[in-house]
Image (tube, grey):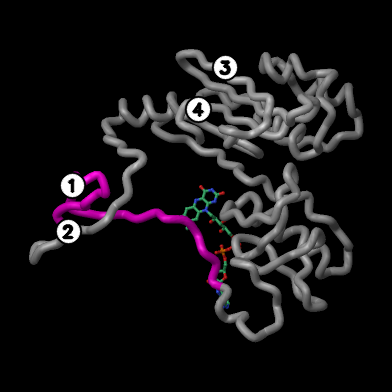
Amino acid sequence: MEPEDARLIRRALDRAGLSIKTGAAATAVIAGKDGVSAVALDDGSEVACQMVCIGKGVRPNVEFLEGSGVAVDAGIVADRYTACNLPGAFAAGDAAVTYEPVTGEPIMTALWTNAVEMGRCAGLNMAGVKTAYTGTFGILNATQVADEPFVSMGVVHTAGGDYEVHRHETDAAFHKLVFNPAGDRLVGAVFVGDITNAGLYRYVIREKMPVERFKRRLIDHTLHYGHLMRINPLSRIY
Ligand SMILES: Cc1cc2nc3c(=O)[nH]c(=O)nc-3n(C[C@H](O)[C@H](O)[C@H](O)COP(=O)(O)OP(=O)(O)OC[C@H]3O[C@@H](n4cnc5c(N)ncnc54)[C@H](O)[C@@H]3O)c2cc1C
């Protein structure tokens, strides 16, 4: 999340009694004979502690493929049908490089929902049912932080980008919608506090639906499943 989108989360964490430092990197773990005592930061300060937990991203275990001929670019490269460059080989999940449906760029994510969808698609293709993978959202987080539910999907980092961005914040909820430069497609969304109908927004983004008929409802957060069913009665929304 961009800092101005994360204010409610930040407030919830502050209220939960956590002290959060952003924009600072750890440079050393300080330990003596009794174990760890502090972490040194690059701003010269130290944080006293008895335990250190590290979360620094995800890297797939693909070293075993060296020399196999399987194309690897950080992860295993999969095409639109989850197939690798070698016949009969497929890739899915955290280890696979697939594509982002909004930008079309290659992407790797480490999310269970994506792994399940991709795995299902790879399974169908392995069984001979040619099935295109609908793509992995660059960011699709749905979780709860200090009692604050939040969802983020599609393009959410907009600083410096050419997007039409709508933000609406109350004391209890924050909604951010990101449209393409032409303003006729929804490409990203962030909801904090109130995540009602997030699945609907996900559908609109993923299907690249032209939004002119219901854009106001999207922005006002009054769109519901009935509206979309009326626009596209054959849509499979989940
Ligand atoms: C602490 C933690 C919290 C997470 N929280 C969330 C969350 O809240 N929401 C969410 O969406 N996702 C979350 N994830 C990510 C989610 O777990 C993964 O995206 C998902 O499990 C990926 O599924 P996968 O089948 O691709 O890989 P995995 O589940 O990692 O399965 C890969 C399997 O391959 C095996 N393997 C590895 N190398 C080899 C080899 N050479 N030969 C044979 N087998 C091998 C591994 O042992 C493993 O069993 C979390 C992950 C972690 C670690």
| Residue under the point 65% across and 72% down | 72
The secondary element bearing badge 2 is classed as strand
Q: In this view, does 115 lie to the left or right of 13?
A: right
Of the residues shown, which amino acid type is indicated by label 3? Answer: His
Per the image, the residue denoted by label 4 is 5
Ligand 1: give its quadrant: bottom right
Quote the CA–CA distance across marks 1 and 4.
28 Å
- The C terminus appears in which quarter of the rendering? top right
N-term-proximal mark, 2 vs 3: 2
Of the residues shown, which amino acid type is indicated by label 1? Answer: Glu
Badge 3 density bin: few <14, some 14–19, many ≥20, Cα 10 Å:
some
Q: Write down the quadrant of residue 53 in the picture.
A: bottom left
Badge 4 density bin: few <14, some 14–19, many ≥20, Cα 10 Å:
many
Quote the CA–CA distance across marks 2 and 3.
43 Å
Q: Magenta stretch? A: 36-61
Quote the CA–CA distance across marks 4 and 2.
34 Å
